[in-house]
Image (spheres, rainbow, N blue to C red):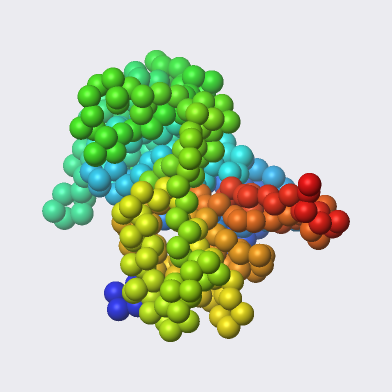
Amino acid sequence: LSPDVNRPGYRAVTFDELATAYLEQTRGLIDGGVDTLLIETIFDALNAKAALFAVQQFFNEGGRVVPVMISGTITDASGRTLSGQTVEAFWHSIKHLPLLSVGLNCALGADQLRVYVRELARLADVPVSAYPNAGLPNAFGGYDESAQEFAALVEDYLKEGLLNVVGGCCGTTPQHIGELKKLADKYGPRAVTDAVQTRMPTLEESQLVDNEQDELTAPLAKGTTSLAGLEPFNITPASLFVNIGERCNVTGSRAFARLIRSGDYEAALAVARAQAENGAQVLDINMDEGMLDSEAVMTTFLHLIASEPDIARLPIMIDSSKWTVLEAGLKCVQGKSIVNSISLKEGEERFRHLAGLVRQYGAAVVVMAFDEEGQAD
């Protein structure tokens, strides 16, 4: 998000700058002999995606491949990261790279963190980790929870079979870890094959009767496409019509194009907000217009959307006929978006390259039925 409240579209650092820094760090750590990479205390999935992009680039360039662990941070009782994502939305946003584990750490003590670790354990098809703080900080910034108190609280995670990796974060000491080790020896690890893809109900859905809530938390069917903005959106084989808002499209809407050309982003955001409020499940954004700097405009508009939670809760469909515009959009979206679209027009080699990049950015993709000879019959 922008560090300047007067410029919500501004970013102090770009995706490319982050990825370059992470690539250098990855190279240095692996050259130095590390056995595992841990990308941790994640409060913004876009930062994590830049790190994952860099790690995958290092592997693609022939670097030594090591396991990768991810650990996010839920900041408070809202159950969201600092940038606003729910646990499920966070998981869908970062699961595209093969992971040794996914987990949560920091910000909360074991007592407060457990409910979110439980949700992640129900979602993830990889090992799950947790290393909470030693309670919440006191008035002086210290931590008062003793080693025995900390271990007793984490034992509840072990009794439930939630974890494969366990430890401690802020305020924990070798004594805390020692007490935890004594208890952990009594329990087996979480069975990864038992993980089911479920989700917690939203605040509005929690008002539903029990049998309706049961439908919400049922396992997702095989073949489900999971997308995310600040909140998750799952398209299952049983899903019917998916409502994709198409009014933020300079090609399809003259009114929206006039707003973008004149730089009236406040009114342009109102178009996006109206679609979100009126039932759109995905927002399509298209900036392909000859008089626009499409890459710059796409970047600005997606940054502005990110600062509007009532819009950013929805997954984004990044829509363009130009790869440079699609890639500019992918570098702005923290959730799992959709690329619309790529095809075989430029041949199989180019298609494979672009498809690999889409995956590296952590997006879904629409593939048009075109090849070098034209559109399929």
**Horizontal relation, residue 47 to residue 359: left or right:** left
Residue 175 can be seen, yes or no: no
Residue 186 position by quadrant: top left
Q: Quadrant of the N terminus?
A: bottom left
Q: Position of residue 368 (x, y in %)?
A: 70, 52
Q: Is residue 62 above or below residue 19?
A: above
Taking the spot 34% from the left edge, 73% from the top edge, the residue there is 267
**Extreme residue in the right direction:** 373
Please provide percent x and percent y for residue 178: 36, 30
**Residue 107 image point, x, y percent:** 29, 47
The image quarter in which residue 131 lies: top left
Q: Is residue 193 visible?
A: yes
**62, 1: nearer the viewer:** 1
The residue at 36%/49% (across/down) is 279
How far from the left and from the top, in percent, is residue 82? 33, 54
- Please give the name of the residue rendered at 73% of the width and 54% of the height, measured from the top-left corner: 343
- Judging depth in this view, the residue of 210 and 4 nearest the camera is 210
